[in-house]
Image (spheres, rainbow, N blue to C red):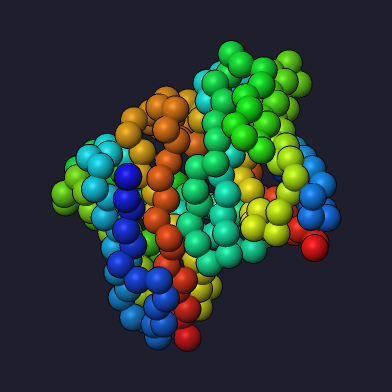
């Protein structure tokens, strides 16, 4: 089974802190994605990566950065956390573009910024 | 740009059939997907359909695709309380880089006993 593991299920951080959300996949997938999910807004793509050290901005990259130093790991960084970044964060991976396998998602990290 | 639309809520009684509808805009999509998200969890791939198919059946699930109208539906027969979840429709679109999936906002299915 393909597994996408997010390091924390729940996280509480203070405003202004630097926050790292980690995601690891074990199936040698090329593509990895970070989304945030908010009620009524669905999934919004923050950043994605299609190869090691490669990254592309999604729809809402402001206030976030990412790092992909190894193929299996994709980190989302909140440089200075703010209360409007309180959300559910979902990581996903996929084998390749056009694959019928779609995305495999992690269980999510619910981040609260106080 | 690409867009996927679905209604936000659906309520059914246990044992009834549920039909969740979705419309999409990218006629070049090769695959269309349904994902299920249970409370507090990530999304799980439920089923998918290739764009040259009209229908796909998998146990209690039936996916219907109308390419002309760009309409996708998911029918759940004999809906159970365990089917209560948010269901996301998604298309793979080559409008963005690397064939990203475009998701709808999700339909929250509530099943009443």
Apparent side of residue B1 relative to residue B100 in the rendered image (left or right): right
Image vertical order of residue B51 relative to residue B86, above or below? above
Apparent side of residue A49 relative to residue B11 in the rendered image (left or right): left
Query: In this view of the protein, which residue sits in the foreground, A64 or A6?
Result: A6
Name which quarter of the figure residue A11 lies in: bottom left
The residue lying at 50 percent from left, 62 percent from top is: B41
Q: Quadrant of the C terminus of chain B?
A: bottom right
Image vertical order of residue A14 relative to residue A104, above or below? below
Query: In this view of the protein, which residue sits in the foreground, B3 or B14?
Result: B14
The residue lying at 27 percent from left, 50 percent from top is: A25
Q: Residue furthest left?
A: A70
Image vertical order of residue B43 relative to residue A95, above or below? below
Tell me, yes or no, if residue A82 can be seen here.
Answer: no
Q: Residue furthest top?
A: B52
Image vertical order of residue B63 relative to residue B54, above or below? below
Name which quarter of the figure residue B38 lies in: bottom right
Apparent side of residue B13 relative to residue B64 in the rendered image (left or right): right
The residue lying at 43 percent from left, 41 percent from top is: A103
Tell me, yes or no, if residue A24 can be seen here.
Answer: yes
Apparent side of residue A28 relative to residue A12 in the rendered image (left or right): left
Name which quarter of the figure residue B14 lies in: bottom right
Give percent across and percent down for residue A20: 29, 69
Q: Quadrant of the N terminus of chain B?
A: top right
Give percent across and percent down for residue A21: 32, 66
Give percent across and percent down for residue A73: 23, 53
The residue lying at 64 percent from left, 63 percent from top is: A39
Give percent across and percent down for residue B48: 55, 31
Total marks in image:
0
């Amino acid at each position: 089974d393909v597994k996408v593991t997010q390091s924390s299920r729940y996280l509480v951080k203070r405003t202004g802190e630097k926050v790292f959300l980690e995601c690891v996949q074990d199936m040698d997938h090329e593509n990895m994605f970070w989304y945030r999910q908010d009620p009524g807004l669905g999934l919004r793509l923050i950043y994605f990566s299609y190869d090691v050290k490669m990254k592309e901005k999604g729809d809402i990259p402001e206030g976030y950065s990412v790092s992909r130093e190894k193929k299996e790991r994709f980190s989302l960084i909140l440089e200075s956390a703010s209360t409007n970044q309180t959300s559910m964060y979902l990581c996903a991976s996929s084998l390749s573009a056009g694959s019928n396998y779609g995305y495999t998602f992690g269980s999510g990290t619910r981040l609260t910024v106080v | 740009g690409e867009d996927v639309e679905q209604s936000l809520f659906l309520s059914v009684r246990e044992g009834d059939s549920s039909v969740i509808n979705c419309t999409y805009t990218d006629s070049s999509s090769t695959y269309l997907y349904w994902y299920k998200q249970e409370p507090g969890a990530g999304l799980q791939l439920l089923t998918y359909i290739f764009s040259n198919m009209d229908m796909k059946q998998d146990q209690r699930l039936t996916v219907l695709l109308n390419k002309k109208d760009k309409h996708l539906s998911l029918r759940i027969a004999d809906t159970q309380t365990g089917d209560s979840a948010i269901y996301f429709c998604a298309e793979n679109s080559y409008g963005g880089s690397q064939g990203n999936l475009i998701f709808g906002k999700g339909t929250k299915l509530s099943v009443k006993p």
